[in-house]
Amino acid sequence: MAQEPEIEKLEIADELIAERRAGKVGDTPEDMHPLMRLIVGNIDVLNNWVGKLTCLMLVPVIFAMIYEVVARKVFIAPTDWAYDTSRMFSGAMFMLGAGYALMRGVHIRADFLFRNWSPRTQALVDGSLYLLFYFPAMLFFFWVSTEYTIKAWLTWERSMDTALMAPLAPARTAMPVGALLLLLQGVAEFLRAYHQLGAGAIQKWVLRLLPVYVIALGMIFCNSLFPDVFNFEMIFGGAFDGGIKGAGGLSSPMIGVIMIGVMLFSIFVGFPISFTLIFLAFVFGAWGFGGKMVFYLQTLQFNNVMLEQTLAAVPLFVFMGIMMEQAGLMERLFTSVQLMLSRTRGALYLAVLFVSTIFAAATGIVGASVTILGIMAAKTMNRSGYDVRLAAGTITAGGTLGILIPPSIMLVVMGPVLQIPVTDLFAAAIIPGIMLAAMYAAYALIRCWLNPSLGPTLSEEEQPVTSDYYWFEAILVIGSILTFFTLIVMAFSGSLVGYFPFSSLVIPLAWMALMYFGSRWVRDNKPSGFFFSDLWYEFFMGLVPPSALVAFALGSILFGWATPTEGAGCGAFGALLLSLAYRKLSARMFYDALIKTLEITVLILFLVAASNFFGAVFSRLGTPMLLTEFLLSWDISVTWILLIIMALIFLLGWPLEWVPIVLIIVPILIPVLVKLDINLTWFGILVAVNLQTAWLSPPVALSAYFLKGVVPEWDLKDIYFGMMQFMVIQMIGLIFIFVFPEIALWLPEYIYGSLQ
């Protein structure tokens, strides 16, 4: 019998990670050459220690945000240092941790082809692309970022967009240091691939060609950066010096078209996408408008991402989700909801969807939600005779809500890409997220009503002990909780201000105290045999703390009390306090959460920087305008153009994660959307729901494999059939939002209209 997986031992925060490397750091194959073992082992250990130290940089970011919010809101004394502290520490963190992430194998690959190849073929492809893509790109980046950083130190350059005017040189130093660590780790990865080839003709040929490669790379490097001293124009035709704009009869926009085609082909080879984009931007930028400009363009784009305040919210929200997942709150809430609905057909379906909706807002991590729901619910569903297909569909569909329901990491990243406030996307995603969850629940209930065998009620032995007034219990408890959250919303919106001092804070707390003391009085006195079942306490303790935390973090952002980064910082700190209150917090758990946060932050933000560089080169080539004119020349309506775009995103969502689609494909489409006067907030929600649909689309959807991994007795075919049912529901929801934009736009218009 297979051993039941343990939640705390699973790597469930990394669905974006294609090939996480397990094993002890520094371990190398016994049959590797001693010198290679020494080099690979020491480089791994170096980057491992850098990663362990770098993840600690998140701690001052959290406390800087907490200090700023308290100082500004309570003492009316805003700081002039918290803004710069948060963005510089988080920016330096993703650059310094990039080598660690490569060592751990967490940079994103489009690996659905790569993982099916033999180890030797994988090694051949990896080794070739390290030589072709990786080393040239990282070498140029290291050199140019070093020049950029030295200039910042010599001139003591300062930030001009903050009151503190903090010096930029310390943070910028992370760029050349991070590039050097990536170069070193690239050497280790290449040696691994070389060893994996095994003794034979290919390995011998690689060894013979290496000196030629090093000489050629050195000549390109010298010709690019020092053309007056090293001029190899006879060999390279000046391509990396002045550019060869129009070479071969091609205009710059057409070079960009080729660039897109090569990119779409290259990323499916399976090499980490970030480094593929960087290399392609170098090559096509040098071809289109010259080497020196493209080199400095990369440094500027990485610098901009490092200093982007909104993106500093990414590690904070990731940390918040990981801490809440590790605190075990999801399991506690699921058990109580399951018992609360035990007399209802399809109770477990409803429990899964209710819990996944709450924790989608708390974690935003699809892999975590699907995995934990599978562990918690599948065993009980099997024992209770639930339909496997409907059960699998419910779990996978519920788990994907984390993509959409705020504070979604995807929406945080999408805001700067679309150049709209993240708060608009957060507000616009709430109603669609709740609507989809309600549609899932309605479908499951209707199926159970038509065919009770799909979701029978729990057996008498499994049902909880309640009073004879169970439904009155439910009405009182749920009504009290809904009133509590209504008061919180009213407090954030300002409706409770002015009754008496601190009324916005006192009234919700007074209602909570009334609920607590009222429940204690009923428990002690049991009037007419009425009492509250113990399950309500578990339900309350599982629901209210995480929901209140999410409501506070999200509400403070939506109603303008805090910036997204400040709200994320408050959420991260609140998750720490919840873990402490539930006696789950330990030094080991805290540090593990920091390390996981570093890994996910690096893979997202490094790809943000790489795609920004790619997009900057693409835009400078003039291709977006060419594509816009091409699309607008079609004799079709705006609706049809938008439908074609949605179909393209859906198809790309099969093999690709949301990160490359949002960061590479969406920016290319923005000029078209602006020209067509399409609301970008509405478009962002359409993209989010569309990508959520791709998570439910077999055979590539990762949700199926997460579930199969923890419920091995379920056949993958049944999981696919279950997912497809909910994919249809998802498509219906997408059509609703497409036809009725107000589903997404009403709430942001209402909130921000009322605040103006």
Image: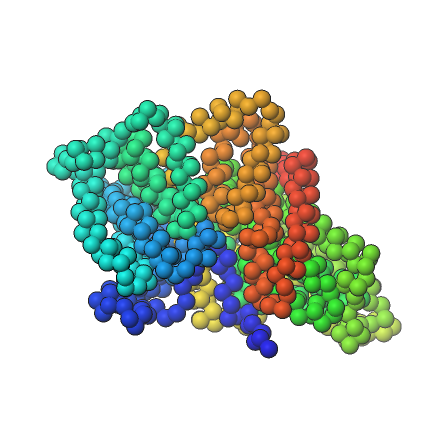
Up the image or down, 575 lies above or below 170; here it is below
Q: Is residue 643 visible?
A: yes
Residue 314 percent across, percent down from the top left: 47, 51
Q: Residue at x 24, y 33 (%)?
A: 239
Q: Residue at x 18, y 42 (%)?
A: 219
Q: Residue at x 66, y 67 (%)?
A: 378
Up the image or down, 484 lies above or below 224; here it is below
Q: Residue furthest front?
A: 201
> Depth check: 723 or 555 in front?
723
Describe residue 335's horizontal placement relative to residue 446 as left or right.
left
Up the image or down, 391 lies above or below 263; here it is below
Q: Residue at x 55, y 26 (%)?
A: 676
Picture quarter with the N terminus: bottom right
> Depth check: 145 or 649 in front?
649
- How are the colours assigned in the image? rainbow
> Depth check: 623 or 754 in front?
623
Describe residue 49's horizontal placement relative to residue 558 as left or right.
left
Residue 180 percent across, percent down from the top left: 26, 53
Residue 551 percent across, percent down from the top left: 61, 53
Image quadrant where residue 395 sits: bottom right
> Depth check: 643 or 504 in front?
643
Residue 700 percent across, percent down from the top left: 55, 52
Q: Is residue 171 visible?
A: no
Picture quarter with the C terminus: top right
Q: Residue furthest right?
A: 528
